[in-house]
Structures are given as C-alpha cells and as structure tokens.
Amino acid sequence: MTDTPVDLTAGETGRVLRDVLGPLVAQGAIVRRPRATAWAERRQVDRTARRVLDGLRARYHGAPLVVRLGGRRMVLATRPEHVERILAGSPEPFTPASWEKRGALAHFQPDGVLVSPLAERAERRPYNEAVLDMSEPVHRDGDALVAVVERETSALVAAVEASGRLEWDAFAAAWWRLVRTVVLGRGARDDERLVALLDALRRDGNWSWFRPRRPWLRAALERRIAEHVAVAEPGTLAARGRDAGGADAVRRQIPHWLFAFDAAGAATFRALAVAAARPAVRDRLLTELTTSGRGPGVLPYARGCVLEAVRLWPTTLAILRDATEPVRWGARTFEAGTGFVVLSAYFHRDARRLPFADAFAPEAWLDGRADADWGLVPFSAGPVSCPGRNVVLLLASHTLARLAGPDLVVSRGRYLAEDPLPPTMDHMGLRFGLRTGTARHGIDASRAAAAAA
C-alpha cells in the first residue's frame, strides 16, 4: 500500500464522474430529487460505484485518488486511515466549509456553523453543542421532546390503521409536524409553508454556485422562523437556543437543524422497512419499547437500527473538506483549496474489512465495533462531527419503535427480509400495507406482556 495520492487518467476520471460522482449529484446533495432517486434504485448505482472504486483502489495499491474537475482538484479517500486523517484534522487544515458546500448552503443558511469561517466557528460550534446537548444520549428536554413523538406517532398509527396503508408522503407530513414542534414549538406544528420555503431554497442549493440566489425567499423563511422563535415555549430547541444565546444566534442555526432532521426522517423510514420485513427485528423493537417504560429512555437497539439504516443507505452521500493551507500527503503537497472527499456509501459497505458490509447488523453499534471504525461515519466524526447526533437518534429511535407497533408489510419485503441488502434504496418509493386483523394490538399486546412479566 502507498500513501501518496495518484492522479487518475482521463479515462479513469471519466468513469469516476459517470459512475461515482455523477449519480450523487443527480440525486441531490441538499434535497433528494424523487425521479433521480427512483432511477438510482433501479440502476443500483451504489453497486456500480463500489465496483469502480474497488478496481481503482486495487490498481493503485490503496492510494488516495486525485480527480481533476476543470480547475478543481479533489482527493478521494480509499482507506479508513485516510478518513481518520481528514476528519480528525478538521476544521484545520481540513475545513468543512468546502467550496461546494458554501455555494449550496448560501441559499438558505449562509450563517450556519457548518460553513462559518474559523473565527466565527469557534463561537458558533460550542453554542450548537450546548443547545443540542451533544454529549448526552438523552437531551435535557427529553421528556418534552419524546412527548411530541408519542403524540405524532399515535396520530399516524391511527391513520395507518384506518387506511390500511403507509406511504412516504404520509410519514413525511407527520415527521415534519413532529420536527417543527420540537424545534420551534406548538405554533409551528402546522406551518407547512415554512417547510415549502425551505425546500424551495434547498432545491436551489442542489445547484450550489450555479443557481442564482433568491434573497426574497430566504427573507420570507427567516421571518417565519423569527416569529416562531419569539413565542417558542420551554422544552423546544428554539427556546433552549434563545435562552442560551439570544434570538439571532438560534435563528442562524435553525435552517440547518431542520435540514438535518429531514435526513433523519428518511433513515427512520428505511429502518421501518427493514423491521417490517424482519419479524425478529420488529419484535425486538417492541420488547425494548415496552420494557423501557414511559418517557425519554434510551432505546439502544432502536438507535442501532437507525444507525444501521444510515450506514447502509447514507443520508450524506459525500463528506467534503477543503484544505485551509498546503497539505503534505505522502510524497506530494496539495495547495490550499484542494478538496478532499469521503464517499460514505463506499466505506460503509467495504466488504474487504467489514464482515457485515451488506447485512443489517444493529448489534455492531451496541458492542462498539462500528463506533471504533473510522470508515463508518453516519454522523461524520472527529472535532466537527454532527452535534445533533444524540438528539436526532433520540427522536428517530422512539419514532421507529412506536411505528413498529402495527404489523406492517412492506412492498419490497423480499429484498429486505434477508441479507445481502440492496446497495441503493429509494425511501420515497417505499409502500406499506397492514396485515389483516393486526391493527393496534401489536403495541397493546407487547405492553401487556411486559406488564405481566
């Protein structure tokens, strides 16, 4: 193996652009494009990308791969040691405020911590960590947050039992009601216009620098956020942030919190699909929920299922960093501004080192194997890892466990019932039915059994 990055030939660069980077851009880095994600699933684009990268890694003995895109030079990691160097070396000399990311996020969150200059990051990052209770598995407002989950999932379960089906649009609507409530308060629960504005700006963000800004739309979004922040009640993230740093500080971060919770919804829906296809997974989710008691307790297995969904089908397709200064790597030196890329789906399913690469293995997150692997980065890693990891997993795990109550049947169950699992899954294309006569007894029976025990 060698540590000195190698320049790809024109032909190799073309294959990487066509089969690896192109599908990522087509699906949408900031908000998924439904037609493109459906196409990606049909083509199983992640399988093709893995085959291309495996071949290049073997040909160049594990060296990082240098791709030239016009005047832009990108260095692709191929081994976990490369991932560790890039992520452990953030925010200097590898800043998360990459050229592509700054262009994308400028459409709807130009002052967020993720793309902040180093001096401002030094203030904004600790603020985010404090408001989101980064180090705690259960947020200090966990009682209020999980109470919202209970209300919204109960309403969704009732709708599923009445209609006999569950599709992405219904789940997403319920998920956004939950998210708006925990972030901005009860007054924002039904503010669908807020999400419509955010999604319009995120669609612009998919084009990064290549789409003109629409400042009037961003101003409308910020006004709505400000109105909700002003009246957000205790027990919400907005109130916690307002009390910690003021209304202006929390308003800067809320677009990113909403953006991140959207990805969490996709991961939860995918995990639910696996649980519906695997009775043993569903049973364990229900048992854990009923034995944990009421309230915001940690649900380790449910958390592991959500983490597995993100590992198997990453919501962040690529982790990007830019060099803030010249970087010496092996026998080469790269100038400031060079891009460094970690392709999540490739590392998360690297069969060369992971015996469970294509399997559903939530236990790997319970026994420490997954957390010890620098190649497994569902919430990034290092000093700039996602500060919302724990609060996201708290809400997602409780949502998943409660939605496992009805005995759902997923339309693609034959692909999810056994390993290996498909490399690419379009969460928006998932369809669930309800087994006849199961209704609500899944939750009630499990609670009765736990009480009897």
Image (cartoon, rainbow, N blue to C red):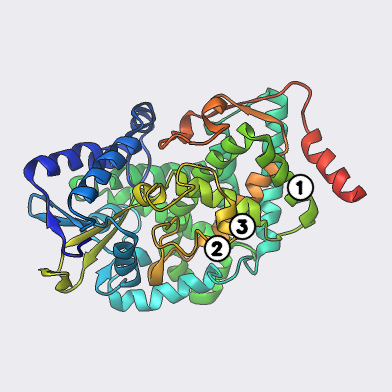
- Point out the tag, 2 or 1, that comes first from the N-terminus: 1
Q: What amino acid is labelled 1 in the image?
A: Thr
Please determine whether, in this image, residue 92 is positioned above or below residue 168.
below
Report how far apart the C-alphas of labels 2 and 1 lie in the structure.
22 Å
Q: How many C-alpha atoms fall within 10 Å of the one at disc 1: few (<14), some, or many (≥20)? A: some
Q: Nearer the viewer, residue 132 or 436?
A: 436
Type of residue at label 3? Answer: Leu
Reading the image, the residue beneath label 3 is 394
Quadrant of residue 122 within the rendered picture: bottom left
For label 1, the residue is 287
Q: Which residue is mark 2?
A: 368
Q: Position of residue 424 (x, y in %)?
A: 40, 36
**Separation of disc 3 and disc 2 at Cα?**
18 Å
Q: Is residue 42 visible?
A: yes
Residue type at mark 2: give it.
Gly
Residue 320 in the figure: left or right of residue 231: left
